[in-house]
Amino acid sequence: MTVPDVEAVLRGLAPQTLGVLLRRYGDFDTCEDAVQEALLAAVEQWPAEGRPANPLGWLITVASRRRIELLRSEAARRRREESVAAREPLQADPPSGSAGDDTLTLLLLCCHPSLPAPSQVALTLRAVGGLSTAEIARAFLMPEATVAQRISRAKQRIKASGAVFELPAQGERSERVAAVLRVLYLVFNEGYTASSGPALCRVDLTAEAMRLTRQLRENLPQDGEVAGLLALMLLTDARRPARTRPDGALVPLAEQDRRLWNSAAIAEGIALITEALARAPIGPYQLQAAIAAVHDEAARAEDTDWRQILELYSLLQRVAPGPMVTLSRIVAAAMVHGPRRGLEQLAAAEADPALAAHHRVAAVRAHLLEMAGDVEEARAQYQLAARRTLSIPERRYLESRAAQRRLTPS
């Protein structure tokens, strides 16, 4: 097996391994560390020695022994557990639930309400996604020590909260699932449009977010918002092949070669959101997926049904208001009613502190001014947006717009 092949297998086995250890021993902190060491051992050994006949059993046994080593200072416990481990066959415990149940339980545990969102993201990627601390740090362009500290504190908080490895009561479940969806949404968005750094996309993050969302849907097939989030990811990621030029430069949606879009992902996403909207209570992820579907169904940019998009954004603003929803609705309003209407709404929206100095406000204003024919002011706003963004591809795109000798409506 190659290392990528091994890593692909381990992504699915990581939550199952941790689930078995948590049911057996209960201490999240030590069990999770032990599983990470077992995963690293597999990456080192399996490519050279071959995949074991029972990979899950191998991981469980190695992780159990690593856990004993981590607890070596407790001599009495070590002797007792080494004796048990020596008798354990290379196979999993008889499962108390399905592998999917373990994944769902872990997702809900990693998104415990006692944890802040950044800690939920880091712990989910490590415990459920099987990513190492170093991989998470590289994906988010953060120091490894910062990620390690965040994960360590998250595990300490879970322990202090008294949380156990079991599904929460039915009354708590919807709120906890909503937290999981927020985490997966954050991971996907950071991967699709990186907030900083030299790359526009981080495919490892978008792929992991989509994989985990698929697993969540397998466990909650009737949840309309889970289906909506998966549809949104599919419909958005389908455009990725056309978002950048060979040199990495950003290509805005209106200028993309739509022949490069992933038609299979679009078809799957449209089928998912169509089915979800027909049977489930409407939610923000379904509305965002519906908007993405309208964009993806247009063969050309000029064929986009902006009136439908404006209606959907108006509904989304009532269901889940937020600064980025406000900005997107303003753009849609400008496409329907003209750029001057959009500029008026943008001036009012800037009263929101979350938007006051955001680079996207300046970028939207530049776009609307360009549409209105105010070339010099549009150029100044493109330059302002370029100075404010931390994304290098976005900065280069905005600077290129400002540098054009003659701006034209786009």
Image (cartoon, rainbow, N blue to C red):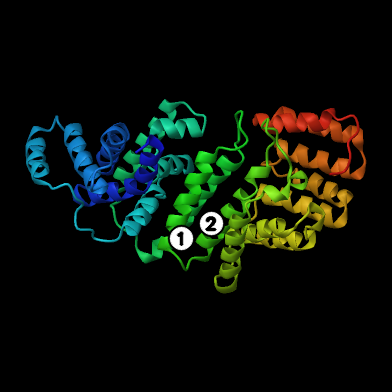
Q: Mark 1 points at which residue?
A: 217
Residue 230: give its label. Answer: 2
Q: Earlier in the sequence, mark 1 or mark 2?
A: 1
Q: What residue type is labelled 2?
A: Leu
The residue sitting at 9% across, 44% down in the picture is 84
Q: Where is residue 124 in the image (x, y as percent from the top left)?
A: 41, 45
Secondary structure at badge 1 equals: helix
- 28 shown above or below 70: below
The residue sitting at 61% across, 61% down in the picture is 267
Q: Residue most toward the bottom? A: 279
Q: Where is residue 259 in the image (x, y as percent from the top left)?
A: 71, 50
Q: Where is residue 153 in the image (x, y as percent from the top left)?
A: 36, 36
Residue 8: image quadrant is top left
Residue 278: give its label. Answer: none
The residue sitting at 91% across, 35% down in the picture is 375
Q: Do the residues labelled 1 and 2 touch (CB within 8 Å)?
A: yes
- 405 with respect to 259 (left or right): right
Q: Where is residue 56 in the image (x, y as percent from the top left)?
A: 26, 48
